[in-house]
Amino acid sequence: MSYDFQKDISGCGLVGIINKDGKKIDGSYITKSLCLMNDRGNGLGAGYAAYGIYPKYKDLYAFHIMYDEPSAKTVAEEYLKINYHIEKKEEMPTAPVEGITIHPILWRYFVKPLAQKAEREMADLSDDDFVVRTVMKINSEIDGAYIFSSGKNMGAFKGVGMPSAIARFFRLEEYEGYIWTGHTRFPTNTPGWWGGAHPFTLLDWSIVHNGEISSYGINKRYLEMYGYKLTLLTDTEVVAYLFDLLVRRHGLDIPTACTALAAPFWKNIDDMDGDKRDAMTAIRMVYGSALMNGPFSILFGHSKGLVGLNDRIKLRPLIAAIKGKTVYMASEESSIREICPSPDKVWAPRAGEPVIAELEA
């Protein structure tokens, strides 16, 4: 008897690494891991996010900006000049790569909001809130300009291509970080374009995602009530903004925010005991419009940790592993073993239960 085994790729591929002791590694490690899952993508999008890569400018916001044409760059820079102190600006270092012949104009800026901003109505905003407003304004109002990274001491690197090509293009081996995430995309409902590649970021939040957020319409309208503008033609954008809203603005801790986004079914809540049932009921009632439906697995990076989360039915794969002070998360165990052949522990997280790894310092 013979068997014909076929691999079920279940869409996009994602991988994340965090060294909880803060030890830095260069981008070649995450690239090697992600490239093992090339068959989960189709060349229409790949990207990486890294934390700790700009220690010289760690107190400044690092804006990575894509421009379609020089005129868009001129308009965007005029807005930045009247609202920010620009410590340094430069064209992003790239390398010639076969297959990437057309790409946006790519620049990065290390900036800090001015005390006296040109937009007087925003004078009382915190620096973080003003940066969020800047991202929303430039991405929605300046045609041909797109801020795709805006955190401190971190950065996103993404585009249209396979993971190895994007890594070579952005020269990732030259960067060292203590947290890395990577993604290879297989677009289904949304177009493949440079801005639509993962990760999606806001401040130091970064998201890579496999699956579909079928609640996108409800989530989008909920976020718009709080001033967020969703313009990037993909459902994943809501995830980054929801974390910003729930954690930074509403002050929820990471576990509670994850519970709100992938809350248990009402029938399961009814079976819970006393205080836990009351708490879950309150979360679902208050944050019902933030609940994400649909098949998904996500990796959520921030300056102090890395979080992995499945939907509440676990319709997309997610594997986690530990080796000493390092935590790995990926769509496939083979991707982890490619860079960590003998982990201390490997497991598949349960549906809706986050894996939370935080820096020890």
Image (cartoon, rainbow, N blue to C red):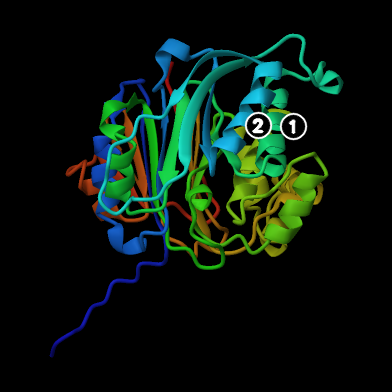
* Picture coordinates of residue 87, whole percent (x, y): 53, 11
Please give the residue where the numbered disc 1 appears in the rendered image.
Answer: 250
* Label 1 secondary element: loop
Q: Which residue is drawn at 72% across and 31% down?
A: 133
Left or right? Give the position of 318 relative to 288: left
Q: In which quarter of the image is residue 78?
A: top right
Residue 251 can be seen, yes or no: no
| Quarter of the image with the N terminus in it | bottom left
Tell which of 282 and 74 is nearer to you.
Answer: 74
Task: Spot the residue most to the bottom.
Answer: 1
* Picture coordinates of residue 97, whole percent (x, y): 27, 46
Tell which of 221 and 164 is nearer to you.
Answer: 164
Tell which of 13 and 349 is nearer to you.
Answer: 13
Mark 2 or mark 1: whose residue is earlier in sequence:
2
Task: Spot the residue most to the left.
Answer: 1
Q: What residue type is labelled 1?
A: His
Left or right? Give the position of 72 relative to 319: right
Q: Is residue 19 above or below residue 68?
A: above
Q: Residue at x 41, y 22 (%)?
A: 52
Tell which of 7 and 355 is nearer to you.
Answer: 7
Tell me whether circle 2 and circle 1 mark residues in contact (CB < 8 Å).
Answer: no
**Can you tell which mark lies on residue 68?**
none
**Can you tell which mark lies on residue 75?**
2
